[in-house]
């Protein structure tokens, strides 16, 4: 900018390029790649065997009904429709759970939106709270909570050599968390490793929580895609039996295939109803200061499906098909890697659950796969199993064999 012949600098004169997002940035690079054999195993999005992310039949039927009813166009309440909140709570906790009456839920734009408003709320109520994440965790977790001003710490979770949860190390690290801290757990289908604690280990963690008094936030983005709806929510239900407060950030992106509708939720389980209502009031403020109120369509679809027994049955069977598809792909990948003669044993991939597999591929191997074969994988070696299909499986497997030897 010049004034009276003098060049004035402005605050944005010298802006360095921002780093690409470690997950969504891969999709941008994938789109720009003109290799006809390219494969995107980056972002966690379900795809069928033709490589398409399908609209579920239950949501198509629900949308047809909604269209007919020509919905009201005014704003939703700050926390979304109460019917949506109720549907979310029932699915996460089950209708008869003792904690349901002391749980409140707000519709958020995706699970990510729920995490961010929870982070802002935690910071507003207790500035600088320390929040603990597993090593590794979803790459966006520390970014979201760090951006809200919270202190991020890590607890050990994955044992690379043994390919599983390093439970003793996890417990030992979490023994340092106290009543002013919040610990983030992945409810099921741990992202990125695909390894969850066992039921006995969850019980021990619940005891540790009672002993140490730390707050808990469950991230539940994959309910139904691991072992089943109830199994994948078992840890949440167990922790909710105690009257210690906890948050649950949940998402219908994956299990309703409603990715682009941004349909998620943030729930809070309080000590009692009054406690839950008081926190809900602050949650409202956090939402109002972020995005005011949620979009309507995705939530309306979910209410329509979950409010109708026949559509709910259809939904559950469609999710069960997705789960079986992931399971088959995982088994197929392990078998194909074995018969490729690859020098490395990948059989542990068969023990993982959900959409992701932590392959153990190194950052250098990931880079070679991208540069030489146009196969896009997150730098940590995480792959989206659903990005595989009967057409690209042998190409992916022979490329992996080439880079690992
Ligand atoms: C993922 O981990 O790939 C998904 O949760 C999508 C995302 O936003 O990162």
Image: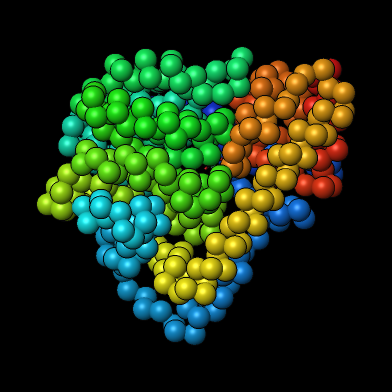
Point 31% across, 50% down: residue: 267
Residue 362 placement (x, y as % from top left): 68, 19
Q: Please state if 273 lies on the left or on the right of 157 as rendered.
A: left
User: Would you say 273 lies left or right of 131 here?
Assistant: left
How is the protein colored in the picture?
A: rainbow
Q: Residue at x 55, y 46 (%)?
A: 227
Q: Is residue 81 above or below residue 205?
A: below
Q: Please state the quadrant of the image where ligand 1 appears.
A: top right
Q: Position of residue 66 (x, y in %)?
A: 47, 78
Residue drawn at (24%, 23%), measured in percent from left and top? 212
Q: Does 270 sit above or below residue 18?
A: below
Whether residue 372 is visible here, answered yes or no, is: no
Residue, far left: 274
Tell whether 157 sits left or right of 212.
right
| Residue drawn at x 87%, y 23% as measured from the top left | 341
**Quadrant including the C terminus:** top right
**361 w.r.t. 43: above or below:** above
Q: Residue 239 appears at what percent x and percent y?
A: 32, 39
Asked whether residue 134 appears in the rendered view, the answer is yes
């Amino acid at each position: 900018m010049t004034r009276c012949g003098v060049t004035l600098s402005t605050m944005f004169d010298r802006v360095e390029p921002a780093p690409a997002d470690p997950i969504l940035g891969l999709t941008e690079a994938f789109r720009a790649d003109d290799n006809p054999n390219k494969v995107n195993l980056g972002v966690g999005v379900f795809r069928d065997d033709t490589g398409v992310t399908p609209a579920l039949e239950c949501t198509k039927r629900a949308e047809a009904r909604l269209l007919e009813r020509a919905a009201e166009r005014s704003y939703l309440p700050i926390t979304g429709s109460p019917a949506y909140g109720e549907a979310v709570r029932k699915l996460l906790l089950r209708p008869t759970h003792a904690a349901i009456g002391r749980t409140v839920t707000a519709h958020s734009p995706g699970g990510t939106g729920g995490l961010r408003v929870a982070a802002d709320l935690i910071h507003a109520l207790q500035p600088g709270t320390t929040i603990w994440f597993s090593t590794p965790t979803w790459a966006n977790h520390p970014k979201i909570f760090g951006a809200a001003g919270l202190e991020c710490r890590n607890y050990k979770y994955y044992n690379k050599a043994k390919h599983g949860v390093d439970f003793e190390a996890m417990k030992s690290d979490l023994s340092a968390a106290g009543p002013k801290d919040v610990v983030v757990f992945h409810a099921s289908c741990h992202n990125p490793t695909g390894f969850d604690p066992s039921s006995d280990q969850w019980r021990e963690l619940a005891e540790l929580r009672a002993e140490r008094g730390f707050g808990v936030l469950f991230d539940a983005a994959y309910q139904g895609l691991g072992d089943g709806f109830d199994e994948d929510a078992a840890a949440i239900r167990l922790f909710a039996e105690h009257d210690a407060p906890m948050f649950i950030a949940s998402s219908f992106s994956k299990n309703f295939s409603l990715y682009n509708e941004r349909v998620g939720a943030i729930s809070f389980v309080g000590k009692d109803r009054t406690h839950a209502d008081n926190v809900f009031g602050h949650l409202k403020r956090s939402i109002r200061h972020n995005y005011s109120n949620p979009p309507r369509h995705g939530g309306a679809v979910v209410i329509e499906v979950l409010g109708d027994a026949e559509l709910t049955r259809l939904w559950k069977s469609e999710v069960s098909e997705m789960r079986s598809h992931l399971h088959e792909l995982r088994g197929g990948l392990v078998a194909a890697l074995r018969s490729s003669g690859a020098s490395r044993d990948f059989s542990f991939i068969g023990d993982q659950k959900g959409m992701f597999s932590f392959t153990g591929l190194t950052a250098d191997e990931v880079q070679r796969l991208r540069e030489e074969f146009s196969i896009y994988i997150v730098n940590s070696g995480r792959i989206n199993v659903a990005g595989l299909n009967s057409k690209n499986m042998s190409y992916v497997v022979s490329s992996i064999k080439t880079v690992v030897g």
